[in-house]
């Protein structure tokens, strides 16, 4: 197959290189997706790509035109007139209508002619670069002179039937004597309904018909074609002997050469079919899991690890002076199973079973989740220091309250209850108020500190649980979805090359 980096020959040109790149891209995608595509589908795609690649070896930039006609219709003479060569002067064997003959405009035509079964002695090549400008416009044309379709030799018709499906244009050559032959119309022409664009009927040897009868003859042939259902098929009157209509015929060939060949069209269509099949087999592209999906399983795992209970225990210990919890308890198995189930249901619901199964196989099992969460929580510090400031304020307040009470009692005993000096009462009252305030501040400070410590434990606990969820659930899922996305992108890129 021609490499895209190599200079393309006339018959292995841009279209061949383009479709070759598509085939290569699809084959690479198929090789990488072999374990996620149904084996039967993969096998059919492989066979199709091998078939397309084999056809591309022959090149699809060429245009195949077949000249077909009955005995005595003048096909070979018309062939020589179009090629502007005396084919009988080329080679040792004079071409006949028993076997196909070919003229190729440009190099690199032998592989196709071998495939079409054209004998090497019945080929001629025109190098368009050495020809006049009018030959250059036909570069890539392969003109075939096929055996007579009405021959008594069964092999002749077999050649015609084998080659015609690969022709981009079929020139049906008829003569004034047998143009109405029912075998021609019922055996061939009526089967061409719907293929008028790739068919041209040539009424040859019009030079043998008086000038005043030519137009009625053409009209009668057009009527017969219309009765066959070929109302839009082009009809051309020509004479290989006089050259009448040959220029118009060559102009038609130039138009056909300028468009994409049927081989290229068929190959491109097969490539699209393979790409569509592979894209369908890979399934729809789903959005990757987001923070909301992670948050759901973090909440479940936090509950399974008793994160809130540990936080409450920290608060109770700091407020009441009891012992702090030593750490987190065992992660509950049911909670780990629930978290994993939640993750799979949220991230694989729209995936094909093969991708959902791969995600399930790649993410952590419930036992692995439990172990990973437990190990991560071991790094979270549960033991904390009580606030010295709050404790000092509280005990200072207690002392001041005691001093105020004792001072007031002492003053009463010394001066009498009714004779206590104002300054003594004021001092006791001030100490009492300040003491109460310090006690309140100490208690509030202890509670605030306890809540902050509990929030820290919860925050750090959630952070390590989230890290576990991302590493053991999200990352493997993203790997699988990333692989599916890359495969789909390869398939879509191959389809976009068309």
Image (cartoon, helix red, strand yellow):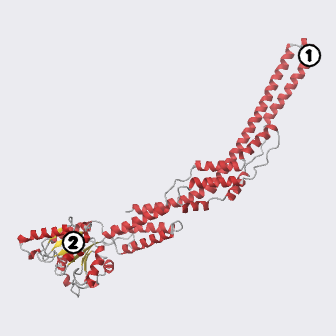
Residue farthest along the top direction in this orientation: 419
Q: Which residue occupies 9% across, 77% down?
A: 208
Mark 2, residue position = 135
Determine the secondary structure under disc 1: helix
Q: Is residue 130 visible?
A: no
Which residue is more in the foreground, 237 or 420?
A: 237
In this rendering, is residue 453 above or below 411?
A: below
Determine the secondary structure under disc 2: helix
Is residue 87 found left or right of 282 in the rendered image?
A: left
Q: Which residue occupies 30% across, 73% down?
A: 165
Which residue is more in the foreground, 389 or 71?
A: 71
Q: Which residue occupies 79% across, 32% down?
A: 442
Image coordinates of residue 462 in percent, x first then y, are 67, 47
Give the tally of numbered discs.
2
The image quadrant where one finds the N terminus is bottom left
Quarter-of-image position of residue 364: bottom right
The image quadrant where one finds the C terminus is bottom left
Image coordinates of residue 368 in percent, x first then y, are 68, 59
Is residue 386 found left or right of 91 in the rendered image?
A: right
Image coordinates of residue 228 in percent, x first then y, are 21, 69
Q: Residues within 10 Å of mark 1 (few under 14, many from 20)?
A: some
Image coordinates of residue 424 in percent, x first then y, are 87, 16
Real-space Cα distance between discs 2 and 1? 135 Å
Mark 1, residue position = 412
């Amino acid at each position: 197959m021609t490499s895209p980096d190599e200079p393309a020959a006339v018959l292995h040109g841009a279209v061949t290189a383009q479709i070759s790149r598509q085939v290569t891209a699809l084959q690479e995608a198929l090789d990488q997706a072999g374990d996620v595509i149904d084996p039967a589908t993969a096998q059919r795609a492989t066979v199709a790509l091998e078939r397309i690649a084999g056809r591309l070896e022959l090149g699809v930039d060429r245009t195949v035109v077949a000249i077909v006609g009955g005995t005595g219709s003048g096909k070979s003479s018309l062939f020589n007139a179009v090629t502007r060569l005396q084919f009988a002067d080329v080679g040792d064997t004079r071409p006949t209508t028993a076997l196909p003959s070919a003229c190729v405009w440009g190099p690199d035509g032998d592989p196709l002619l071998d495939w079409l079964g054209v004998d090497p002695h019945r080929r001629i090549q025109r190098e368009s670069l050495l020809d006049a400008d009018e030959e250059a416009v036909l570069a890539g044309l392969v003109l075939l002179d096929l055996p007579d379709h009405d021959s008594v030799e069964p092999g002749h018709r077999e050649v015609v039937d084998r080659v015609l499906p690969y022709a981009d244009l079929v020139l049906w050559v008829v003569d004034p004597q047998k143009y109405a032959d029912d075998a021609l119309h019922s055996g061939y022409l009526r089967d061409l309904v719907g293929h008028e664009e790739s068919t041209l009927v040539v009424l040859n040897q019009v030079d043998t018909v008086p000038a005043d009868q030519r137009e009625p003859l053409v009209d009668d042939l057009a009527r017969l074609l219309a009765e066959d259902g070929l109302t839009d098929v082009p009809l051309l009157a020509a004479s290989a002997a006089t050259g009448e209509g040959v220029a118009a015929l060559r102009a038609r060939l130039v138009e056909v050469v300028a468009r994409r060949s049927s081989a290229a069209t068929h190959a491109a269509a097969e490539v699209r079919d393979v790409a569509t099949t592979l894209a369908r087999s890979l399934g729809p592209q789903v959005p990757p899991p987001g923070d909301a999906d992670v948050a759901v399983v973090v909440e479940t795992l936090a509950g399974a690890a008793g994160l809130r209970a540990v936080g409450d225990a920290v608060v109770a210990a700091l407020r009441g002076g009891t012992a702090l919890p030593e750490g987190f308890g065992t992660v509950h198995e049911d909670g780990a199973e629930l978290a994993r189930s939640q993750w799979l249901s949220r991230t694989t619901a729209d995936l094909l079973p093969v991708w959902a199964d791969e995600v399930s196989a790649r993410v952590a099992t419930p036992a692995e989740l439990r172990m990973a969460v437990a190990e991560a929580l071991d790094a979270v510090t549960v033991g904390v220091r009580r606030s010295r400031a709050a404790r000092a304020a509280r005990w200072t307040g207690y002392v001041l309250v005691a001093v105020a009470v004792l001072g007031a009692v002492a003053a009463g005993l010394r001066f009498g209850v009714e004779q206590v000096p104002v300054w003594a009462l004021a001092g006791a009252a001030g100490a009492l108020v300040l003491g109460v305030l310090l006690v309140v501040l100490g208690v509030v400070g202890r509670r605030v500190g306890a809540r902050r410590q509990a929030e820290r434990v919860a925050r750090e606990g959630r952070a390590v649980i989230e890290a576990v969820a991302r590493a053991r659930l999200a990352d493997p899922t993203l790997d699988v979805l990333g692989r599916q996305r890359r495969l789909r992108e390869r398939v879509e890129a191959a389809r976009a090359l068309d």
